[in-house]
Image (cartoon, grey):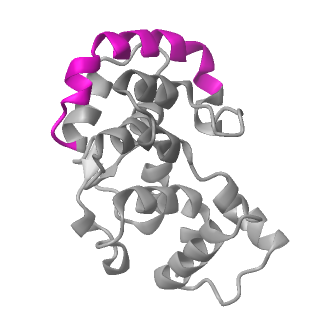
Amino acid sequence: MNILKEWERDPPSELMMSIPALWYDFKKRREDPYSPVCRFRDNIPDVCADLPTADQAIRYAIRSKRPNGKMHNHQSKVSKALPAYEEVCVRHLMPLQTSESFGSLYFLLNHIRTPGIGPMTVYDVAVRFGAWAELKPEKIYLHAGTKAGLKALGIMPKSYEETIPMEMLPPILRRKDPDEVEDFLCTYRLAFELLS
């Protein structure tokens, strides 16, 4: 999603000259059902959290179908690779459902990923299934969108490969929900480039 185009359609209520102003704009748009920031938010974890079994939750998480029946845009380009990944994940369901942390869940999902499945899909599946298992990220997981956002903020360290700790983020973001910050970093990456 290009936040700059969204701003053309619906201009921000204040100048977007600081990270706090951008965060406020993000939060406001995330709650507005007419905003693409809200409409494109991944609501699949909400469904997964309410499913009765781990098998149903992992299948729903991987199939990436929103409650309205449409596939989440993150997985639309890898849809042909999803069935093989689902099959492997179902075979590893016991270790997945007994993961003690989000990090261990992510590590296993990444370790067993099949061809065509990248870090974005692994992260999305971990967040979705993690909602069922009551596991949430505690760090920022790196994939193309978060890397672009961090690079635009000037804080993308080369020594980190999969995650960065929340302490490396600007102060306003450090105590926020990491999954929400991940969404912010991706969605507002073009806006970060405008900060002086």
Q: Nearer the viewer, residue 176 or 94?
A: 94
Q: Is residue 2 visible?
A: no
**Dominant secondary structure, magenta:** helix
Quadrant of residue 103 within the rendered picture: top left
Most extreme residue toward the left is 100
Left or right, 52 with reference to 162 = right
Q: Which residues are magenta?
A: 77-101
Which percent across, then down, holds residue 28? 61, 76
Q: Residue at 72% across / 59% down in the picture?
A: 36
Q: Residue at 61% across / 66% down in the picture?
A: 30
What is the tally of numbered marks visible in this picture? 0
Left or right, 120 with reference to 169 = right
Which percent across, then down, holds residue 22? 55, 77
Which percent across, then down, holds residue 17? 57, 85
Query: Is residue 187 on the magenta stretch?
Result: no
Q: Residue at 64% across / 26% down in the picture?
A: 77
Query: Is residue 90 on the magenta stretch?
Result: yes
Quadrant of residue 96 within the rendered picture: top left
Left or right, 87 with reference to 17 = left
Which percent across, then down, holds residue 195? 54, 78
Q: Answer above or below: position of 125 versus 154.
A: above
Q: Answer above or below: position of 163 versus 52.
A: below
Q: Nearer the viewer, residue 96 or 195?
A: 96
